[in-house]
Image: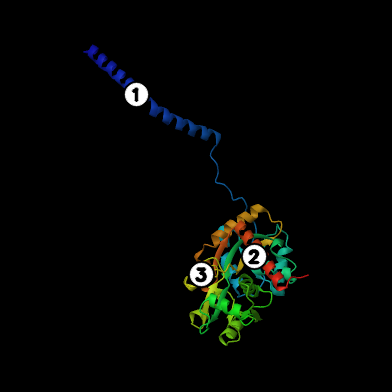
Amino acid sequence: MKKLLVLILAFAMVVTLAACAGTTEPSDTVSAESTDTASETEDEPDQEPEEPAVVFDKDIRMIVPWDPGGGTDTAGRALVENAEKYLGVKINVENISGGIGAVGLAEVVNSNPDEFVLGVLHVDLAFMKAQGAYPFDFNDFTQICNINSDPSALTVSADSEFQTIEDLIEYARANPGDVKIGHSGTGLLWHLAAAMLANETGVEFTYVPYDGSSTGQAALMGGEVDAVTYSGAEVSPLVASGDLRVLATFTDERMDLFNGEVPTAIEEGYDVSVMTFRGIGGPVGMDPAVVAALEEGFSQMAQEPSYIEAMNNRGLGLMYLDTAGYEALCEKTGTDMENTLDMLGLLAE
């Protein structure tokens, strides 16, 4: 009996060894993975969670170079409402107005790059220095990100004979100087927008400046001018009420503000893209790591529902661009504006 048990045990051992020999390939695979894991564990001991590249140790100042309540102020304040959530510190907004924005912007330009002083930068930096109205332009700032865009909208009264942008251009071509276009001031953005359309189409307009968009729109409805080139956001209330009609927007894509129903000038064959935009910048010489940390924080703030709601409530367009995209936008706009000013004879000597 004992001999039988010994034989049975011996047979079982042989079978087990044979089975193990038949599973060599999977065993090797598992062994390789285990070896790699073990090697990685040995080479890379347990690590603590990575600390942020930049830790802000005090609140940040952000200058709005205009009075409270305007579009620039609204965009800036709404954006940084959740700053502490993403940066660990607050961003305190200060309104420093005067000199068509130059006083507040000078505060940013002249700040120490290590002091965390930022500003809400406006499109005016693309053309005011070229006219001698500002001592600085976008190149005098560290550009961090863009947060807003509001394209120009070629707008007529609801009862205008011009039903399309083509109608207006054809009339202007046949009657040089007869088409009067209202804008926000000589050498300012909406004047330059109308001039860019004239340059693109080879027609001649008469430009009529007004103190503000509300005054210009009243003049449009009163028949003093044939069209205006204010932003879509500025004309949208009177478009919604049926008093005004937009012929085309000067942007790459149709505006949601008009339910995507208004064509762009580009769609109609006129390569004109002009928009006001607002971004965040600081003094020249900021640490690139700080700029990257701020850009990342702002990109998250720009996705907050409270920010989106505030912008939508004011009819302000949402357009977030990272540092590279913002720099490219500033450079292109500066070139376009300078060329247009040159054409108008408005470049400073």
**282 is higher (above) or lower (below) than 11:** below
> Considering the numbered disc 1 on the image, is that residue within a helix, a strand or a loop?
loop
CA gap between label 1 and label 2 equals 72 Å
- Badge 2: residue crowd in 10 Å (few <14, some 14–19, many ≥20): some
Tell me which numbered mark, 3 or 2, is placed earlier along the sequence. 3
Quarter holding the C terminus is bottom right
Front position among marks 3 and 1: 3
Residue 342 lies in what quarter of the image?
Answer: bottom right
**Viewer-nearest of discs 1 and 2:** 2
Measure how far apart labels 3 and 2 are at the Cα level. 20 Å
**Picture quadrant where residue 138 is located:** bottom right
- Are dots 3 and 1 in contact, CB under 8 Å? no
> Where does label 1 land, which residue?
22
* Comes first in the chain, label 1 or label 2: 1
The numbered mark, 3 or 1, whose residue comes first in the sequence reads: 1
Q: Position of residue 241 (x, y in %)?
A: 49, 82
Q: Amino acid at mark 1?
A: Gly
Which disc, if any, is residue 255? Answer: 3
Looking at the image, which is closer to me, 163 or 341?
A: 163
Q: Looking at this view, is 268 or 239 the one in front?
A: 268
Return the residue found at the far left.
Answer: 1
The kind of secondary structure element at disc 3 is: loop
Task: Specify the amino acid type for callout 2.
Answer: Thr
Asked where in the image residue 336 lies, by quadrant, the reply is bottom right
Q: Position of residue 188 (x, y in %)?
A: 67, 74
* Residue name at image x 29 percent, y 20 percent: 15
Q: Amino acid at mark 3?
A: Met
Q: Nearer the viewer, residue 202 or 247?
A: 202
Label 3, label 1: how far apart the Cα atoms are: 68 Å
Give the residue at mark 2.
Answer: 333
